[in-house]
Amino acid sequence: MSKEKAENRNPWFWIPSLYYAQGIPYVVVMTVSVIMYKRLDISNTDIALYTSWLYLPWVIKPLWSPVVDIFKKKRNWILVMQLIVGAGLAGVALTIPVSNFFQYSLAFLWLVAFSSATHDIAADGFYMLGLSQRDQAWFVGIRSTFYRLSMITGQGLLVILAGFLETSTGNIPLAWSITFFILAGLFMIFFVYHKFILPYPSKDVSARKDESSSVLDEFLKTFTAFFKRKNIGIILGFILLYRFAESQLVKLATPFLLDPQEAGGIGLTTSEIGLVYGTIGVICLTLGGIIGGIVIAKQGLKFWLWPMIIAINLPDLVYVFLAFTQTTNLWLVSLMVGIEQLGYGFGFTAYMLFLIYISDGEYKTSHYAIATGFMALGMMIPGMWSGWLQELIGYQNFFIWICIATIPGFIMAKLVKIDPEFGKKSE
C-alpha cells in the first residue's frame, strides 16, 4: 500500500470502528458498572458516589492532553490505550468473585477510565487532524452513531448476556466475570484491527514546534489560549449546565428500573434492563443522533440549538410518569425510555458539535480535551450526590427534581454565542 493511500484511507474504514471502540469502555465504566453493582447488592448511595468518581479521569484529562499533543503520534496513543483498556477489563473480571470485590474492581475500573480518557484525547485529535472541517461536521453524526452502537453492545447485548448467565448459572458474580472477560477479548480485536487499518495522516505529528521551548511552556500555551477565548465564562457555564439534569438522571435510571416496586422502582430483571435501556433505549438514542447530525448539516448549529436543548430536557417527564404509575407493562416502559433517549440523542448532537466549535485553532486536540474535561465535571459532581438525594426523597420526588434541574441549561443556551454558519454542509 502506497504512503499516499495510507494517508487518505476512506474514513468509513476507521471512523466507525474507532468510535465504537471509544464508546465501550466509557459505557462500561459509567453505566454497566452501575447495573453490575446494583445486582451485587451495593447501595444506590455508594453506586452513585463511587461510579461518579470514575468520571475524574475525563475531568482532569486536560492536564495530560498536552502530552498527547506534544509527544508521539495520536495513532500510537490510540493503539497503546486499547491494549491497556483490555487489560483493565480483564482485571475487573478476575476480581469480581473475590472478597472485597467492590474496592478491587473499582481500582481496575479506574485503570480502564484513565486509559479510556487518554484514548478519547488521541482519537478525537486524530479525527480532527484526519478530516477537513466539512467532513468533521458531516461525520459527527456517523461517529455518534457508532458510539451509540457500542452502547447497545455494552449496556444492551452484554447486559442481556449477563442476565442470561445469572439465570443459567445461578451465580451472579460468575456471570459478570464472564461478561467482562468477553469485553477484554473484544479490545484485543480492536487493537489488532486498528494497528493495520488506521491511516497515517500527514498532520499527525507532534504539536511542539519550538524545540528550544520546554514542555511546560508548550503545556501552558495550550491552556492560556483556551481560557483567553472571548466569553469563556459563558462557554464554560454552557458546558457545565447543558446536561445538569441528565447527569443526575443517568445515575438512577437503571437502579430505578431494577428496584422492586416496594422500593419505588419498576422491578425489571437484568436481561429486561439490557433490552429496554441498553437496546431499545440506545437505538432511539442513536436515531436521535443521526437526525440531529442531518438537520444541523442543513441549517447550522445556531438554528437548531433551542429545539435540541428542549429535546434533551422535556422528555425527562417520562420518568415522573413511570415513578408514579410503576407500570409493569414492559412495552410501555420501553416506549417511555425510548422517548427520553430519542430526545437525549437529538439534543446531545448540538452539545458535541459545540465542543468542536470552540476547539478550533492551533491546539485542537488539547482544547477539545479541555472542553470535554469540563463536560465530564458537569456530569461528575451532580452525579455524586444523586444517589444520596434519591434515597432521601424517594424516586417520585427525585424525578420531579430532575425536571426542575433542567432550568439552568435553558438559561445558558440563551446566553451562548454561535456563528450562524457553523455546522452547515457546503453546497
Image (tube, rainbow, N blue to C red):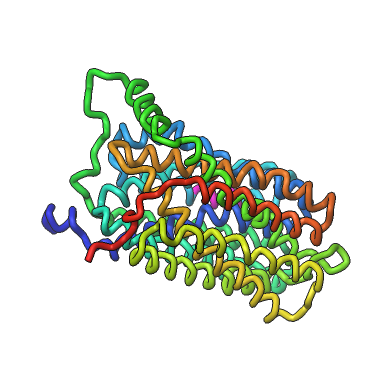
Q: Nearer the viewer, residue 411 or 16?
A: 411
Q: Nearer the viewer, residue 427 or 399?
A: 427
Q: Is residue 341 above or below residue 330?
A: above
Where are the magenta residues, as a range?
Answer: 87-92
The stretch drawn in magenta includes residue 204: no
Residue 410, can we see it?
A: yes
Q: Quadrant of the C terminus?
A: bottom left
Q: In terms of image quadrants, where is residue 371?
A: top left
Q: In terms of image quadrants, where is residue 362?
A: top left
Is 367 positioned to the left or the right of 318 in the image? left
Q: Is residue 350 above or below residue 81?
A: below
x, y percent for residue 326: 80, 72
Is 138 positioned to the left or the right of 10 in the image? right
- Residue at x 40%, y 49% (from the top left corner): 418
Q: Is residue 233 above or below residue 418?
A: above
- Residue at x 78%, y 47% (from the top left corner): 388
Residue 39, can we see it?
A: no
x, y percent for residue 425: 28, 63
Q: Nearer the viewer, residue 59 or 6?
A: 59
x, y percent for residue 115: 47, 43
Is 109 positioned to the left or the right of 420 in the image? right
The stretch drawn in magenta includes residue 90: yes
Q: Main secondary structure of the magenta part?
A: helix
x, y percent for residue 347: 51, 61
